[in-house]
Image (cartoon, grey):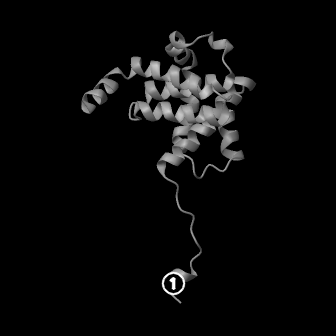
Amino acid sequence: MSDNENKPATKKKLSLTTQRRNARSYALQALYQWEIAGQPVNEIEAQFRVDNDMRDTDIKLFSELLHGIAGAKSDLDKSYLDFLDRQVEELDPIELTVLRIGAFELAQRIEVPYRVAINESVELAKKFGATDSHRYVNGVLDKLAQRVRMAEIRDQRQRKS
């Protein structure tokens, strides 16, 4: 028997994409709790780290989203206000939180391609939101991307032609 046969099976590390997706999912839940319960962000973050198995999560991204979005809430809301068909206060709390995550990633995480930022938000809306909220989120974030990622979008279009 070889040494390899005696070793216990190790859990395969998840891809960075999956770890980031998990971070966004936890961030959505933590931000929702912050919005509804009004607890301090630091307490919510500590609670999530204790209550959830976050081994397969990009903890740095989770923390960045949680603190960054909480700190820039009104600026984020202003960034997509022109693209809403109703007041921010009338949005479903999940839709609102997903829009904030997408807007934050579009504006602050330039290393993330705009299509990825939009798609990840759409996936969150599909998983946690109402039936057609993903369509609404997609439409709003697509228009916001045209504004905040104009150079990236133009560059991509030129490469295709």
Nearer to the camera, 132 or 154: 132
Above or below, 46 against 158 in this view is below
Vertical side of 160 occupied by 142: above or below: above
Image check: 156 left or right of 103? left
Q: Residue at x 47, y 32 (%)?
A: 117
Residue at 53 percent across and 62 percent down: it is 12
Counting from the top left corner in percent of width and height, residue 55 is at 59, 52
| 144 relative position to 53: left or right | left
Q: Nearer the viewer, residue 88 or 119?
A: 119
Q: Residue furthest right?
A: 37
Rendering coords of residue 78 (x, y %) = 53, 12
Image position, residue 68 (x, y; %): 53, 27
> In the displayed structure, does residue 10 sit left or right of residue 146?
right
Please name the residue shown 52% across and 58% down the image. Answer: 13
Q: Find residue 20 and report its horizontal and vertical position in percent.
A: 52, 43
Identify the image quadrant of the C terminus.
top left
Q: Amino acid at mark 1?
A: Asp
Residue marked by disc 1 = 3
Tell me the residue at 51%/21% (across/down): 139
